[in-house]
Image (spheres, rainbow, N blue to C red):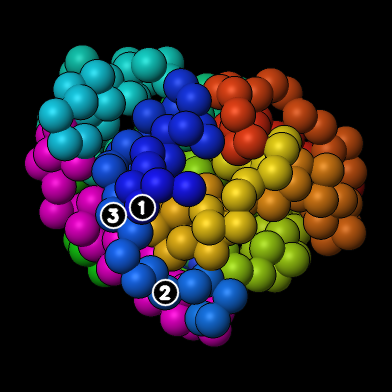
Amino acid sequence: MPDTFKFSAYTHSIGHPISHRRITMGKPKQVSELSDEEIKDEVRRAYARVASARQGSCCDKDTSCSTDSLAARLGYDVDHLPASVTESFAGCGNPTALASLHEGEVVLDLGSGAGLDAFLAAKEVGETGFVIGVDMTEEMLQKARDNATKLGITNVEFRQGDIEALPVEDNSVDVIISNCVINLAPDKTKVFQEAFRVLRPGGRLLVSDMVLVGELPKEIQESVHSYTGCIAGAIPEAEYLQLLRDAGFEKVEVLGRDGSGAVVSSKIKAMKPA
Ligand SMILES: C[S@@+](CC[C@H](N)C(=O)[O-])C[C@H]1O[C@@H](n2cnc3c(N)ncnc32)[C@H](O)[C@@H]1O
C-alpha cells in the first residue's frame, strides 16, 4: 500500500468532498484506538472545515468534484441557490427527491450540514409543513441558519444535537431524510432506534448513505481520514438493513445504488408500522 491514496479508489463516481482529498498517511491515528466520543470529535473537526470551505476548495485541483457540480450530478437543481448553500454540500445522494414530500408534512433531516436538503424539503412541504435539521457541528449549524435567513425560509429550524440522541419529541415527525451521515455515527443501532422513536406511526425514512458491498483494506478501515470521509464507518448493506428491522422498521428496501467499488451510495427506504 503506498503512503498516499485517493479515497475515490473506493467510492468511484461519488465525488464526496472529503473523499477526493489527497491524503498523506504519515503516522495516522487508528480508528480502533478511538472511543466513540473521540471519533465524533474527529468528525466534528472535519465538517467544521467543510463548513468553512469555499466552492471547489476542498478538491485540490480536480475541478470536476466541486461541491456545486457534486450536487448537480446527484440531481439537485442548484441554479437558483446561493453558493453558501452548495459550497459545503457533502451528500452522496438526493434523499429529498426520494421522499415524495407532501404539503404540511413534518420532515427531520439527520445531519443537515449547510442545509441543502432541508431547504428543498421546506419548499415542498410549504407553509403548513415544517423541517427540522439536526447536526452536531456548530460551524455547519451556523452556516445553515445563515443560509435560511439569506433565503427567507421560515419553516425550518436547525437544532444542535447528536443523531444518536435526537433532540426531537416522540412520534412527532412524518418523514426522516438523511444524506451521507449515518455512516459517520459510531453507534448506528442507537441512530435507528432514535429515528424509530421520533417518527409517527406510518412515517417513512429515506436515506442516501455509504454502505459496504465489498471489503476494505485494513489500512483504510483504520484511517481516521477515511472515517471522516464516509468510507471507514460504512457497514455492510445487509447489516444496515437488519439494524433498521431490529429497530422496528418494516418494508426495509434498497431503492438503488450509485457508484462502484467496495463502498457505494445506497438509497434506502423504511417504514414505521402504522
Ligand atoms: C457528510 S456531511 C453531510 C451533510 C449534509 N447532509 C449534506 O448532504 O451536505 C455529514 C454531516 O453530518 C454531521 N454529523 C455527523 N455525525 C453526526 C452525529 N452523530 N450527530 C449529528 N450530526 C452528525 C456532520 O456534522 C456533517 O454536517
Q: Residue at x 69, y 21 (%)?
A: 256
Asked if marks 3 and 1 touch (Cβ < 8 Å), the reply is yes
Does the numbered disc 3 mark a residue whose Cβ is under 8 Å from ligand 1?
no
Q: Secondary structure at mark 3?
A: strand
For disc 2, the marked residue is: 29
In the rendered image, residue 55 lying in the magenta stretch gets the answer yes
Left or right: where 274 falls relative to 92: right
Residue under numbered circle 1: 3
Q: Mark 1: which amino acid? A: Asp
Magenta stretch prevailing secondary structure: helix
Q: Residues within 10 Å of mark 3 (few under 14, many from 20)?
A: few
Q: Is residue 250 above or below residue 218?
A: above
**Secondary element at tag 2:** loop
Query: Which residue is found at the position 14% from the left and 29% from the top?
Result: 61
Choose mark 1 or mark 2, whichever is in front: 1
In the displayed structure, would residue 192 be above or below residue 34?
above
Q: Tell me, yes or no, whether the two marked residues, 3 and 2, touch with CB atoms within 8 Å.
A: no
Residue 245 in view, yes or no: yes
Q: Taking the image as four quarters, which one is ligand 1 found in? A: bottom left
Residue 26 is situated, as x and y percent measured from the top left of the image, at 31, 65
**In the image, what residue type sits under mark 2?**
Lys
Q: Amino acid at mark 3?
A: Thr
Residue 155 shows in this picture? no
Residue 106 image position (x, y, % from top left): 55, 46
Name which of mark 1 and mark 2 comes first in the sequence. Answer: 1
Task: Give coordinates of residue 22: x percent, y percent.
Answer: 27, 43
* Mark 1–mark 2 distance (CA, rounded to whole Å): 14 Å
Q: Which residue is mark 3?
A: 24
Q: Residue at position x 24%, y 51% from top?
A: 50
- The span picked out in magenta is 35-58
Return the disc, 3 or 1, that comes first in the chain's sequence.
1
